Image: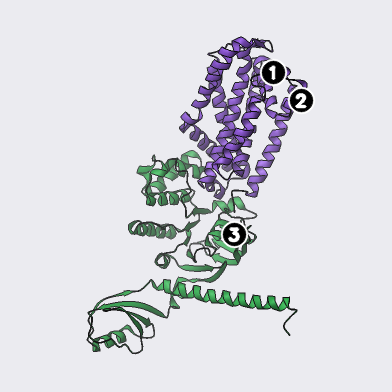
Chain colours: A purple, B green
Amino acid sequence: MNSLYWIALKSIWRKEVTRFMRIWIQTLLPPVITMSLYFVIFGNLIGSRVGEMGGFSYMAFIVPGLIMMSVITNSYTNVCSSFFSAKFQHNIEELLVAPVPTHIIILGYVGGGVARGICTGVLVTIVSMLFVKYEVHSWFFIICTLLLTSILFSLAGLLNAVYAKSFDDISIVPTFVLTPLTYLGGVFYSLTLLPTFWQWVSKFNPIVYMINGFRYGFLGITDVSLLITFSILILFLVVLYFIVWKIIESGRGLRS
Amino acid sequence: MSSTPALEIVALKKRYKNGVEALKGIDLTVQAGDFYALLGPNGAGKSTTIGIISSLVTKTSGQVKIFGYDLDRDLVKAKQQLGLVPQEFNFNPFETVLQIVVNQAGYYGLPRKKALTRAEKYLRILDLWDKRSSRARMLSGGMKRRLMIARALVHEPKLLILDEPTAGVDIELRRSMWDFLRQINQQGITIILTTHYLEEAEMLCRHIGIIQHGNLITNTSMRDLLANIESETIILDYEPLSKPIKLDGFTFVEVEPGTIEVKVNYKNNLNILFELLNEQEVKVVSMRNKTNRLEELFVDILRQGENRNESQNISQNVSQNANENGGVK
């Protein structure tokens, strides 16, 4: 039985990776171009006038945030669009008819989202190296934050896809929720620059913790406690996984 | 052949959220190795039944077993026995033919190497091997149908359900599909087929069930069902005469000059009809059935079912009114 599930998981994951690799012009290239523009405009042109932030050049400061931004967006979008397309075209029925448990379906799709998030993260990191030289403070924190964040946003994308009834529904959350939270999550600034009240408000934004954890891995600086960062990440992950599992298991939007 | 039935359905009910009662307590057993036709008008409950068997629709109550495996208790084992060819194309049109079949094999736990071998086997049998690298959306309608059959067979299920597999398929392909289905049935795969082509059901199936308004109103062997046919309507074309035709003992209508529709009771002999025609020096040019004989019977059965349903509704309304009025005194 375990081998059946393992093979099924690999099959879903392979299908997902093949999908985003096949359309790499739509999936992998755009974040590289967008982030290159951020590096040129905010890092080089404007950043040189901003000066240092947290003891690092502005360019070095924003790099981890920009990498994390591309990981979040791509993990989310990958799962959301792929799962919704499968629902829309009814090919999700291939999985529903087969002896594939809900956990395997979730893990397969999330695995696809994580793969795309990491691919994009690696590409953006390589591009960033053309603009700024930096030393990595802790690979452990980089890898942990990267994995946890991409898993978390893959799950969020899956939740969105399960609920979505039209293509509009899968663009609403990224546009009106994800993008504002990411921009306000401290990609371009240190939270210490904000007035006390807004610092307090920012702490309700989960992306703040992800960017801080990731930035700590690169630069060794953080605005919030790392213990809180990882506790919050894991808490969100567990809660979101449970919600997604419960909803898919109930057949909502998938079975009549 | 296994003595465990391929499919056992007991008191299966389905009520959708909008209140529609699609299945009102169906009992059905399909024996292993059978070729079974599930017929019924649109909206009768066929697709809901198939949906429940294949886990695409959740049942309200009742029990479904596939080769003895209960959908509620042994879902994985039950699903492994089943292959489904749905009515609508439901593959990813951007994937290649080979990817679709191999992925499906993977969902059933077939290791990659075995999945590739199995995919090649069924794509070759269904004449799609040359198209293995084509995107599914580039295939013709007939090829798409065959792709869905290959996908459903790749894990070699013991029970294959086909929901209108030949809808919109040209005659040549339909006949080759019939041959193929007969072959795999002879090899031991139990087949359940829904179709609107009654000729197809008559040609292929050994047993037949008719669903109407969520009830299974007929469940019998094809032979027994056809034995119930008492009459057939035939159309005769003849060289027009100056005087009207007389056919005592037969019901007939003149459709147009030179063409009559005659209802031939099986108790009457066709020879009698031709004797009468000969006496009047009628020169028959051609003779054909008005419709498939099963089609006439099917319509009759549905009409009887409709009448039963109306009577039930009337009696329910009467008793409801009686209750509302405090009982009939």
Let me know if residue B112 appears in the view.
yes
Label count reads 3
**Tag 3–tag 1 contact (CB < 8 Å):** no
| Mark 2 lies on residue | A200
Does A63 sit above or below residue A231? above
- The three-letter code of the residue at mark 3 reads Lys
Q: Which quarter of the figure has residue B96? A: top left
**Residue A226 circle label:** none
Quadrant the N terminus of chain A occupies: top right
Tell me which amino acid carries mark 2: Trp
- Estimate how packed mark 3 is, as few (under 14), some (14 to 19) or many (20 or more) residues with alpha carbons within 10 Å: many
Classify mark 2: helix, strand or loop.
helix
Q: Are marks 3 and 2 on the same chain?
A: no
Q: Chain of mark 1?
A: A
Chain of the residue that carries numbered disc 3 in the rendered image: B
Viewer-nearest residue: B154 or B57:
B57
Quarter of the image with the C terminus of chain A in it: bottom right
The residue under label 1 is A190
- Depth check, front residue: B33 or A73: A73
**Rendered location of residue A19, percent (x, y):** 49, 35
Which disc, if any, is residue B65?
3
> In the visual, does A48 lie left or right of B274?
right
Badge 2, how many Cα within 10 Å: few under 14, some, many 20+?
few
Mark 3–mark 2 Cα distance, whole angstroms, equals 58 Å
What is the three-letter code of the residue carrying label 1?
A: Ser
**Sequence-earlier tag: 2 or 1:** 1
Chain under numbered label 2 = A
Q: Secondary structure at mark 1?
A: loop
Question: Which marked residue is nearer to the observer: mark 3 or mark 1?
Answer: 1
Residue A236 falls in image quadrant: top right
- The spot of residue A189 in percent (x, y) is 67, 18
Label 3 to label 1: alpha-carbon separation: 61 Å
